[in-house]
Structures are given as C-alpha cells and as structure tokens.
C-alpha cells in the first residue's frame, strides 16, 4: 500500500510472522519509511538543540560538562532538558563534530572537534594541564591509510600527580609534624 508521502506501508503478508522472518519484519518497518539513508541523515540533519549545543561549544572554546551546557542554555532562555542535552551530545559525537573526555572524577567533558587536545590529569585534585605536543598524528595518518578508517579525533590523556599534589604528599602537614614531635 502506498502512503501519500510516497513511502510504502508494510502489507499484512510482510507482517505475518509465519510467512516472514523477524529480520524481514524489521526491514519492512525501517527501510520503506526512510527515504534518506541513516548515515546521510546523521551528517546533514541536526535538531535545533544540537545546533545550539554545537554553537555554544564553539563559542566557549573549552571543554565543559553536560550540566554546564544545560545551565548555559537555560540561562540563554532555551527550554531544554538535561536528558536532551545528553542525547544531543551523543548524536554530535557520532557525527564527529563533538569530542568528549573523561576526567579523574568520572565526569565527561565535551568540546567541539576543532583540534586534538591532550592533557596531563592529576588523579588527586583533578586538575588538567593541556599538552601542546602530539606524537600521535603520524600514527593517525598511517591508520587512516592502512585501514581506510575515517578518524574524527583522538585523545591522549596522561594520569598522575601534579606538582602541588606531589609536594603535599611528600611534606607532612603541620598537624602531622606536631603529632610526631
């Protein structure tokens, strides 16, 4: 049966489990109703909220949490839910225009994919220092050519202790010195 928009409705024979496999049923529901291939849709069609989030990330030009994005958009007067922010960020990540990295607290930080950013992250205080050098670019090119794999971005994160935390651990506090002496 043909719909008004030119797509086909699955017929009863397509839906009858005794005559069709489960995959055929899924096929009948998905493909005839999708005139544009899903990979094209993901690249070219964004929701208003996805566009707002991407614009915000480009404007901020730093990595921020989903909660910060949510609060900033609300402050700008946009009626958006936190779950929508997370869904939009995931879609933008799959498109390759947003990257995320996880900090030592487990929280994810998001930024627009403009350039590779690498960090030294302290496990004790959670501070992150950006690294300017990138030893991975040559490997990225080799992988792209060898495997014909489209790489959107990569992350390089080193975890350890910053100078301040090393000093704090190495030198006993005033209270510890009083207890010892």
Image: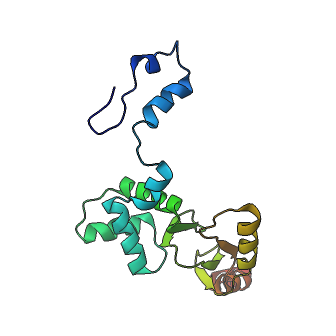
14 left or right of 21 in image: left
Between 164 and 128, the residue placed more toward the observer is 128
Q: Quadrant of the C terminus?
A: bottom right
Which of the pair 102/97 is nearer the observer? 97
Considering only vertical position in the picture, is 73 above or below 119? above
Q: Nearer the viewer, residue 5 or 174?
A: 5
Residue drawn at point x = 63 percent, y = 67 percent: 151
Q: Residue furthest top?
A: 18
**Image quarter for residue 58?**
bottom left
The residue located at (70%, 83%) in the rendering is 166
The quarter in which the N terminus is drawn is top left
Residue located at (37% from left, 32% from top)? 8
Image quadrant of residue 52?
Answer: bottom left
On the image, the x and y values in percent for residue 141 come to 72, 74
Q: Position of residue 42 (x, y in %)?
A: 46, 56
Question: How far across and how far down the image is residue 177, in percent?
Answer: 69, 84
Q: Farthest residue to the left: give it.
A: 77
Number of marks present in the image shown: 0
Classify residue 21 as left or right of residue 70: right
Q: Residue 63, relative to residue 8: is it above or below?
A: below
């Amino acid at each position: 049966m043909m719909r008004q928009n030119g797509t086909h409705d699955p017929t009863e024979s397509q839906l009858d489990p005794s005559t069709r496999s489960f995959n055929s049923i899924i096929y009948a529901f998905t493909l005839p109703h999708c005139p544009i291939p899903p990979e094209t849709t993901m690249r070219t069609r964004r929701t208003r909220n996805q566009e707002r989030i991407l614009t915000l990330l480009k404007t901020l030009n730093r990595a921020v949490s989903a909660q910060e994005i949510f609060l900033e958009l609300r402050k700008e007067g946009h009626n958006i839910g936190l779950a929508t922010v997370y869904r939009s960020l995931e879609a933008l990540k799959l498109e390759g225009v947003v990257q995320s990295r996880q900090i030592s607290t487990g929280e994810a930080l998001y930024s627009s994919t403009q350039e590779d950013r690498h960090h030294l992250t302290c496990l004790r205080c959670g501070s992150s220092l950006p690294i300017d050098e990138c030893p991975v670019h040559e490997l990225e090119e080799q992988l792209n050519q060898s495997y014909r794999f489209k790489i959107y971005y990569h992350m390089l994160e080193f975890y350890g202790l910053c100078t301040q935390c090393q000093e704090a651990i190495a030198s006993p506090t005033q209270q510890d010195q009083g207890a010892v002496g």
